[in-house]
Image (cartoon, rainbow, N blue to C red):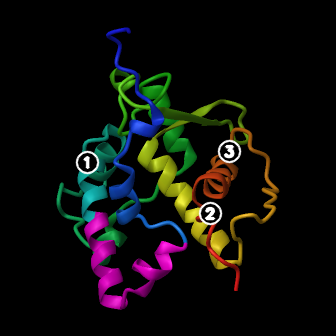
Amino acid sequence: MSDIEIPYYWKSLNWDAFMEAYPPPPFFEKTVGQFDDEQVRALQERRLRERMSEAWSVPFYAKLWRQAGLAEGEVCGLSDLHKLPTFTSDDFKGAIDAAPPLGDHHPIRRSEFGRFPIKIQSSGGTTGMPRITLFDTMAWEVQGIQYARAMWAQGGRPGDVVQIPVTTSLANMPWGAYVGAFHWLGEPNVARE
């Protein structure tokens, strides 16, 4: 055996805790799907604070927000979202130019490659120049769960034939649908109504 620590995908998350925090179908309907408005708002507020705290450590966002006159901790709830400046794909191009080849708009640093699985997603958009987005396991699977919830809400169930009508090429959207269908659409023993 080698002394190399292999970052196996299946070991990259505490999957039970992950599913509790982000319940896939059909569990979503029985948990978060049963929340009243106050509970939903509290969950959204907590997650926003967590994401904002993480994002301040990302050079792209810290610079963008400081240039807009924001201080760390100033956006701490949903009612503060209007304070955040918008940005475009041109800003991401600038982030890549500032820190080639991956850019400074990711929470994942190049030095972390090999510690955990990272999905490198690239889109050239209309320019043909690649714009890199990095996803760790959690980000990738949360997207999949969101797509699975949508498929479930539309009547999709295990055993159904699912066509993803967009090309699974460089764009992120079809891959989210793929992960949703293959990883999270639901447990096979759920009976159809």
Question: Range of the magenta residues?
Answer: 26-48
Mark 2 and mark 1 lie on one chain; the one further toward the N terminus is: 1
Circles 3 and 1: CB atoms closer than 8 Å:
no
Residue 3, x across and y down, in percent:
32, 10
Residue at x 34% of width, y 48% of height: 14
Q: Majority secondary structure of the magenta segment?
A: helix
Q: In the rendered image, which quarter is residue 128 located in? A: top right
The amino acid type, in three-letter code, at marker 2 is Leu
Residue annotated with mark 1: 56
Q: Quadrant of the C terminus?
A: bottom right
**What residue did someone put label 3 on?**
171
Tell me the quarter of the picture where residue 188 sits.
bottom right
Amino acid identity at mark 3:
Ala
Q: Secondary structure at mark 2?
A: loop
Residue 52 rendering spot, x and y as whole percentages: 28, 57
Q: Where does label 2 land, which residue?
A: 185
Residue 47: within the magenta?
yes
